[in-house]
Image (cartoon, grey):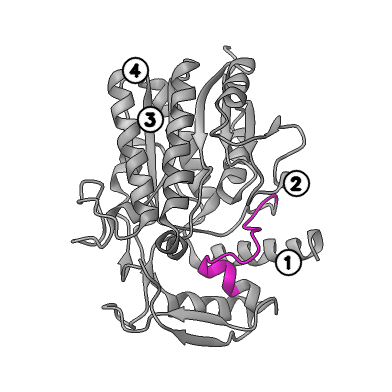
Amino acid sequence: MTAKPAILVTGGAGYIGSHAVLALKDAGWPVITIDNLVTGFRWAVPEDVPFYEADIADAPAVEAILREHHVAAIMHFAGSIIVPESVDNPLKYYHNNTAKSRSLIDSAVQCGVKHFIFSSTAATYGIPETSPVREDCPQRPINPYGMSKLMTEHMLDDVSKAHDFNYCALRYFNVAGADPHARSGQSTAGATHLIKVAVEAALGKRSHVGIFGTDFDTPDGTGVRDYIHVSDLATAHVHALEALIAEPDRSHRLNCGYGQGFSVLEVLNAVDRVTNTPIERRMEPRRAGDPPALISDNTAIMERFPWKPLHADLDRIIEHALRWEQKLSEIRP
């Protein structure tokens, strides 16, 4: 039986990247991680996984890693992800998400890495004309975060036509939850993810939860999102890797979501129910760059990959997020 080649995970000490490392390990893939630890945590990477503290734009360092480990594919998670911040500081996002991705892709080409899985986003769609959102819907981002990711999608597409190289851009909807075995979770202080913020409030780590916008064109006036469990998302990356290797002439751009939307109020009601702790809610003005609703059509990924979500239940997502938050209190009092 041929040994599986090594996979480099960028941003492997971060929230989604650390879950991808676990999913790859669980599936028997050799993994190497790189992270500059600006927002990631060294302890989030298993001790038996080679770890390099470096920036993905440091081409000599990246290329040395790729060559030393004979890396066959890159899973790229490193980047900045906060939508309102991207509106206030667009150049940070075009630098971290676009310019640095360009450097990483160039390093991949220089070192003969043939497969690339990219952490993209539903924010590339902007305000969709139809719901649920299909992959062939127009991509018109309304914030620099979405645009910075879309530009990288275009780079990957162009590179795939010019080199022996294929890619999968997975467009995430709202990622939430934590590893069911509490091996990793969302650990960033001051995170803006709704479920993370809500379970922090339920545990007394925050005084309240802000609801940013109550006048959206949605059933209850609050924003509607498609929440996907981070472990199901990580498994989708492993399927994407296997598909790229099996069909080296084919690339993919696919939604990653469950195809079901929940409003902010519905999520908070679920957190109240799961934790049995009513959370104080404060109504705030809308945030810049927030669309009213984003729900995925996940038909394509279900047809192309043998992906069967195991955690497509809002209460379970919240339970796992809560368990991790409790463990995080022990790790970092």
Kindly check if marks 1 and 4 are in contact, taking CB atoms under 8 A apart as contact: no
Q: CA distance from mark 3 to mark 4?
A: 11 Å
Q: Position of residue 253 (x, y in %)?
A: 32, 39
Instruction: Return the residue nearer the eye: 129 or 26.
Output: 129
- Give the quarter of the figure containing the C terminus: bottom right
Lateral position of residue 193 relative to residue 68, left or right: left
Q: Do residues under tags 3 and 1 come within 8 Å of each other at their CB atoms?
A: no
Q: Residue at x 58, y 64 (%)?
A: 191
Asked if one can make out residue 84 in the rendered structure from this viewpoint, the answer is: yes
- Magenta-drawn stretch contains 3: no
- Whether tag 2 and tag 1 are in contact, CB under 8 A, the answer is no
Q: Which residue is mark 4?
A: 163
Per the rendered image, the range of residues in magenta is 183-198
Q: Give the residue at mark 1.
A: 326
Question: Which of the two residues, 275 or 157, is positioned nearer the viewer here?
Answer: 157
The percent coordinates of residue 45 (x first, y second) are: 70, 41
Instruction: Tell me if 92 is positioned left or right of 18 in this view.
Output: left
The structure residue drawn at horizontal position 41% and vertical position 41%, both measured from the top left corner, is 98
- The label on residue 167 is 3
- Residue that lies at the very extreme toward the top in this rendered image: 1
**Neighbour tally class for label 2: few under 14, some 14-19, many 20 plus, Cα within 10 Å:** few
Distance (Cα) linking label 1 and label 4:
47 Å
Give the residue displayed 49% in from the left and 45% down from the top. Answer: 96
Camera-side residue: 305 or 224?
224
- Which residue sits at x=43%, y=38%? 99
What amino acid type should be assigned to the residue bearing mark 4? His
